[in-house]
Image (cartoon, helix red, strand yellow):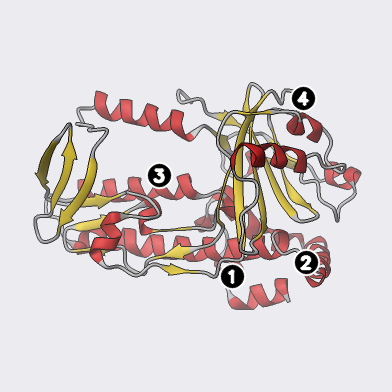
Amino acid sequence: MAGGGHHLTHAIDYDELIPTAAAEAGRQDLSRHVEGVPGPLCLEHVTIQETALNHAIDAGAEVLRGVSRPSIALGESPIVFFEYRGSRQEINCRWLVGADGRTSMVRRQLGLKLNEDPLDHLIVGLLLEGADDWPQDQQSVGKFGDIHYLIFPQGNGKIRIYADYAYRGQARFNGEKGAYELLQAFDFSGVPHSKAIAQGRPIGPSRSFPSQDAWIDVPVALGVILIGDAAGYNDPILGQGLSITLRDARMVGDALLSSSEWSEATFEPYVAERAERLRRLRITARIATTVFARFGAEDIARRARIFQRLAENPTHGLVLSTAFAGPERVPARYFSPEFLDKLLA
C-alpha cells in the first residue's frame, strides 16, 4: 500500500451479449475470493518497483543500477560479468537467480527451450488520468465488436486499460496516435461511464504485446534458477505477471533459507508447484481467450453457447476465478480435458 496500492471492491462486466441491466444485476463482490482481502490490488509497476528496491536497500542489499553487457559463466560457482560505471566487473556466486524478463539472457545462455503457444492475438495497455467519472473501485471486463476490453482503476482518476484484439500481421494502437485511437475505442455505448475513459489523458506509453503463453519445462540448472517471465509466462489476458513473479520470488527465497546447502534438489518443490500453477493458468487463459478474444462469426455463436452453459451451471464459472483466488484454490476437475470439452465445445 505504501507503493500506491488501490483495492477494487466489485466488478460489473458489461458485454455485447448481456443487457446493461442484467450486467449490473450480476455485480460481483471481489472481496469474496480471499478472506481478509477487500479485492484485487491495482498499482503502478514503476512505483512498486521503487518501493521494493528501497526495502531491499534498507535491509542491507547492494543494488547496482545502470549495469550493461551482462553475461554469465555457468558451473557449480556461477560468475556474473557486467560493465558498471565504465569498468568491467565480475561477481562470484553460490547461486544465480535469473529474473531478467521475457528475453532473459540467463535463459538463453542456459540453452533452455521456451515453449510458446501460437500467436493469434495481441494485447495493448495504457495508463491514463482524468477519468474521475469512472467508479474508482469498480473493474469491468467484456467484449464489444473486435475489442476485448479490461478496465482497472488505480485511484484518483487514474485507470489502466487493456484491449485484446486479433493479430493479422500488424499491431494496432501503438505510439501517441495509437493511444488516442485506443481511448476512442473504449467509448462503448453499452458501458456506462465509458466516456470518462475516452476523454482521459494518456500518461504512459501505448504498446501492443504478444498475448500468448510461454513456459519452460524445468527452469533450473546447476547453479541457476529462473523466476518470473524468465522462467516462462502466462498469457497477459489474465493479468497474472506480477502475481506469478512475486510467488516465484517468495518460494525461491524460502527454498534458499531452508538449507545452507544448495543444489537443484533444493528447488524441486518450487519447480513442481510452478509447473502445475502455470499449467492451470494456461488452461484458464485458453478459456478466457476462447470466450473473449476470438472475433469471427462462429466465435460469437460459440460465446453465446458458453454463456448459456454458464447460466445453466454457474459453478462452471469457478475456473475463471483462478485469476482472483489463485489456481490452487480452484478444484482440479476444472483443469481437465473433459471439462474443457464440455465448456468450449
Q: Residue 81: image x %, image y %?
A: 14, 47
Q: Can residue 270 be seen by looking at this rendering?
A: yes
Occupied quadrant, residue 201: top right
Mark nearer the N terminus (1 vs 2) = 2
Mark seen at residue 133: 4
The span from disc 3 to disc 4 (Cα, nearest Å) is: 32 Å
**Mark in the foreground, 2 or 4:** 4
Residue 328 drawn above or below residue 137: below
Contact, mark 4 vs mark 1 (Cβ under 8 Å): no
In the image, what residue occupies the spot 21% across and 59% down? 266
Mark seen at residue 333: 1
Which residue is labeled 2 in the image?
A: 306
Asked if residue 142 lies left or right of residue 324, the reply is right
Occupied quadrant, residue 300: bottom right
Amino acid of disc 3: Leu
Mark nearer the N terminus (3 vs 2) = 3
